[in-house]
Image (cartoon, helix red, strand yellow):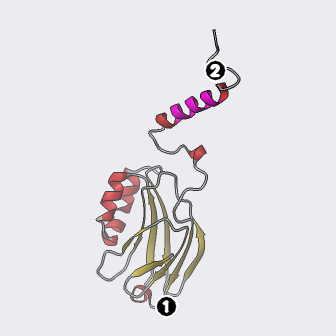
Amino acid sequence: MTDRFGPRHGPIRVSGLVLAVLLSASGCATPSWLCVNPSGVSNLTIRADPNANLDSAVAVDLLFVRDDQLTAQLLQTPALDYFARRDQIRRDYTENDVRRWSWELAPGQQVDRASVSPPCGRKATFMFASYATPGDHRLRLGDDRTVTVILGETDFQVQP
């Protein structure tokens, strides 16, 4: 009788089987030990113009979202509503579903090269800014690793 897991093919087959079981057990998400360099913003600079937000401080939140339902909700949420609900979002979703970084900048201030870490399995990246002027003040970011955010007088923009 031949050993199907013999020395010639055994370790590869067993390793492949173990990997397949682990991937299926993880719900098709990338296991953290396989996630070496996830895509998305990892180096962020935020600059507030001298007249940013009509000369008022601006709260800025960066969110990495891994949950499809929350992604769909946030795509429709203006910043005013987001900031009113962000504590409830934190209670409703685990850190596995959404990771948040927050800053508040006065006009003329700058955050240089903040190090943030996008998770594996990220569905979307959002940035919200609390402006006093009407508007959504929400951006969906792509896969650029280094991003500069400019907080202007009445809105903000992102430069890759």
The outermost residue toward the top is 1
Relative to 62, is 19 above or below? above
First in sequence: mark 2 vs mark 1 = 2
The residue at 44%/74% (across/down) is 59
Residue matched to label 2: 5
Position in image of residue 111 (x %, y %): 57, 77
Q: Nearer the viewer, residue 29 or 128?
A: 29
Amino acid type indicated by mark 1:
Pro
- For residue 15, side relative to residue 84 (left or right): right
In magenta segment, residue 149? no
| Mark linked to residue 50 | 1
Relative to 75, is 20 above or below? above
Q: Nearer the viewer, residue 79 or 146?
A: 146
Amino acid type indicated by mark 2:
Phe
Position in image of residue 26 (x %, y %): 48, 38
In magenta segment, residue 17? yes
The residue at 41%/55% (across/down) is 90
Q: Secondary structure at mark 1?
A: loop
Q: Which residues are magenta?
A: 12-22
